[in-house]
Amino acid sequence: MTAKRSLTRSAALAFGLAVPLLAGFAAMAGLSRCGNFTLDDPPGNSSISRRVYVNDEAVNDSLKPDLIRKGVKFVLQPGRSYEFSVDNSARASDKLKVYYFDSGTPKAFKTLTAVNAGSREVFSFASDLSTAQFFMAQLTAPEGTAAIASLPHVSLSSSAALVSDTLHVRLLFIRKLANFPDSASKGTFAKSLFQQMASVYAPFGIVLVGTYEIVEPQAPAVDFPFGSTFISLPGARIRNNAHLYLVDKISIADPASGLVGEVLGFAPREVVDLDNHRESRVILSARVSDPLSLAITATHELGHFFGLRHTVSTRHDILQDDDASNEEDGFADTKFCALDIALAKQAAVIAGGPSSPYCLRIADNSCSRSNGCDLQNLMHPVDCGTRNQVTLTTSQVTFLKKNLGSYRH
Ligand SMILES: [Zn+2]
């Protein structure tokens, strides 16, 4: 309960930092959330719990034992080339057994042999399956589990040649929206939102192309229950577009979860595919009708959508990974900082609840004491309500463009 009270205080303080537009929402705590969904992970394989994210630079100490013992899972895009590697200048005789999933059961896909290059043991391969999907890999070492100690870092990288600079987004206005009652207001807002998002992306060399659709405008407003269960939404998917679903409100589905406040938006980290997979989407709340505020939330969530971590992990992010080594994103040019203790406490409460697999972006009093944080970074976990949290470092931009390029578009 102590932690819950501290959340209430920091949420109240956040109102002082929030833009005046938010002041009218007495119930709004200024929260946005993001995180890993189950993403239709292969069923029946819960023992394969560790996921390798493409081009992820975090420490990921938890990966190496599972790589040998149980296997680690990851998503590959069709036709793309990847390198699976472990840091070790001497190893070259291991085998990497790669499996795909058939109705949740691992089936042999390829067995790869290694080369040692650049002090790494590297396994090169591509997916020649027709869709983006989960795979699993297990390292077979001559010395068995004794090899774990000699695998300091496990990573999966996509080809550096895949760099894209255009992102198509499809905004879906879902059913009745109190802030956008007619097609004219929706059209005006869509145009402004796309302009603001384009302004955020422009310094990174990413061109945003936005289109929108009004979906069932007379149907009752959607109060989207934020939780672990997949909830379908109406609206057509468009090939080669990332989809933003704007609903009237997002609410905490389970009051006993420890989550407090109103969710502004959320997305999974590294979606399965760009446009078709049912959970590969961003959900946004239309309760904030300021285009710049929503544009920052949308681009932050799209950062997760394409695999970016927070610059510094919240306690909850660490628990979500179940990997204490992942204190930060691993990029050399982002700042690590000590997050406010209230955030850590709040995350600890949430971790104890049934809706734990989510990370947080919360308006918090750590914004008033910078603690060495880069408060203007788009992927900083704390939403300071300043509407200037739009920067990315060179490493983050390189990552974002590489991962964007790996998705079909
Ligand atoms: Zn986030």
Image (cartoon, helix red, strand yellow):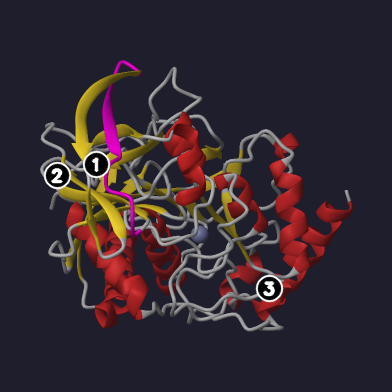
Q: Is residue 308 magenta?
A: no
- Whether residue 38 is visible here, answered yes or no, is no
The location of residue 293, given as percent across then percent down, is 47, 70
Q: Is residue 403 visible?
A: yes
Q: Secondary structure at mark 1?
A: strand
Give the numbered dot on residue 76.
Answer: 1
Residue at the (14%, 47%) spot, across then down: 80
Crowding near pointer 2: few (<14 within 10 Å), some, many (20+)? Answer: some
Q: Which residue is mark 2?
A: 239
Q: Label 3 neighbourhood size at 10 Å, few (<14), some (14-19), many (20+)? A: some
Q: Is residue 279 left or right of residue 334?
A: left
Q: Range of the magenta residues? A: 89-104
Q: Quadrant of residue 191?
A: bottom left
Q: Secondary structure at mark 3?
A: loop
Q: Is residue 225 above or below residue 397?
A: above
Amino acid on which the number 2 mark rests in the picture: Arg
Q: Which residue is mark 3?
A: 338
